[in-house]
Image: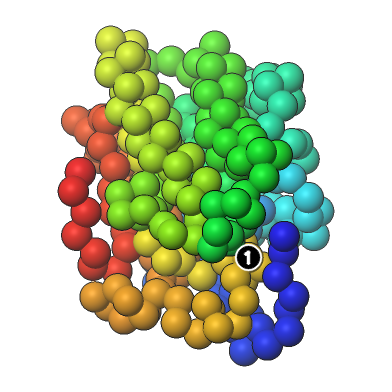
């Protein structure tokens, strides 16, 4: 259940940070490519969409609820001189996932980069508080959607394409208060590695990014003020990161710079050392 906004006002400033690092210059790394980003209306997904646009890609953004956030994201992409397609959809449905890929193919005629980024989580300190429905929904959105969308996208994607899945630091170190969420993120790591082996013969690379604590709207919504006051302070850098500090990892994995990289997960987490 979403937390009350009581006591959270001082943390909202973290959501006002620009989606791209000041001074970042695109160099055409994704020129002529088309990217699909789920959860691209806010947080990490929005930052990825804008970075991709600055690097020359047209972008399709899939979002679940906020038309306002999605329109803001679209405006940012268009401001970079690229086309942006907004698709409002519940990706827990396999039929919806097939349809959204068809919409991208109809609009752009191709799909070169798929970023499976959308996710949900809810804080529960006791396993008994995680209902069967919550568990199912968390897996439907975080994990099953990746399978559905990727399966549909492979009908459009060809040699040289890239799939990038967003996992999490919780997949590697666990989380006592996000048990079901961490379980989905662990599944995503296994899915990424397995899919990479499955698709390597087709010339399609599959990799992942495992963010640590990052200031996103989902974080502000899900945690109470006490949790937010110490969010990210247990990392070696003693702070949480911002979406624009994560998104360049996606640019690298989407571009030809990563032509010899597949089945890997990049850790962007403020210095925590993870066993790969």
Say which quarter of the image contains residue 50.
Answer: bottom right
Q: Where is residue 32 shown, x and y percent of the image?
A: 48, 34
How was the colour assigned to the protein in this rendering? rainbow
153 on left or right of 206: right
Q: Residue at x 26, y 30 (%)?
A: 262
Q: Is residue 213 left or right of residue 95?
A: left
The image shows a total of numbered marks equal to 1
Look at the picture and state if 159 lies above or below 135: above
Check the picture and name the quadrant holding the C terminus: top left
Q: Residues within 10 Å of mark 1 (few under 14, many from 20)?
A: some
**Quarter placement of the N terminus:** bottom right
> Considering depth in this image, is 252 or 151 the residue closer to the camera?
151
What kind of element bears circle 1?
Answer: helix
> Which percent across, then down, holds residue 181?
51, 48
Question: Could you say where residue 101 lies in the image, as x and y percent from the top left?
Answer: 65, 24
Q: Is residue 100 left or right of residue 251?
A: right
Residue 184 percent across, percent down from the top left:
48, 40
Decide if residue 139 is in sight here.
Answer: yes
Name which residue lies at 61% across and 40% down.
135
Is 23 above or below relative to 195? below
Residue 58 visible in the snapshot: no
Relative depth, front residue between 61 and 117: 117
- Which is nearer the eye, 274 or 178? 178
Front one among 180 and 164: 180
Residue lying at the far front in this picture: please name it: 128
At a point 44% along the width and 82% down the height, the residue shown is 230
Where, by quadrant of the figure, is residue 76 drawn?
bottom right
Q: Does residue 168 sit above or below 264 in this rendering?
A: below
**Tag 1 residue:** 222
Image quadrant in which you'd find residue 133 = top right
Residue drawn at x 54%, y 11% is 155
């Amino acid at each position: 259940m979403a937390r009350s906004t009581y006591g959270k006002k001082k943390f909202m400033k973290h959501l006002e940070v620009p989606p791209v690092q000041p001074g970042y210059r695109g160099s055409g790394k994704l020129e002529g490519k088309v990217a699909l980003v789920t959860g691209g209306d806010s947080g990490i997904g929005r930052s990825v969409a804008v970075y991709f646009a600055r690097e020359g890609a047209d972008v399709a953004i899939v979002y679940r609820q906020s038309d306002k956030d999605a329109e803001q994201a679209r405006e940012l992409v268009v401001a970079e001189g690229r086309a942006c397609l907004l698709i409002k959809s519940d990706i827990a449905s396999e039929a919806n996932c097939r349809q959204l890929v068809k919409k991208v193919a109809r609009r752009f005629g191709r799909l070169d980069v798929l970023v499976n980024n959308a996710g949900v989580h809810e804080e529960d300190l006791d396993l008994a508080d995680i209902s069967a429905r919550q568990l199912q929904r968390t897996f439907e959105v975080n994990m099953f959607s990746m399978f559905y969308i990727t399966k549909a996208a492979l009908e459009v994607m060809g040699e040289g394409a890239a799939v990038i899945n967003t996992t999490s630091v919780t997949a590697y170190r666990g989380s006592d208060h996000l048990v079901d969420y961490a379980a989905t993120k662990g599944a995503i790591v296994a899915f990424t590695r397995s899919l990479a082996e499955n698709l390597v013969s087709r010339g399609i690379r599959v990799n992942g990014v495992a963010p640590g604590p990052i200031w996103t709207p989902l974080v502000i919504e899900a945690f109470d003020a006490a949790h937010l006051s110490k969010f990210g302070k247990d990392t070696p850098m003693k702070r949480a990161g911002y979406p624009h500090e994560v998104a360049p990892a996606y640019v690298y994995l989407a571009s030809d710079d990563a032509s010899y990289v597949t089945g890997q997960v990049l850790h962007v987490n403020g210095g925590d050392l993870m066993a790969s």
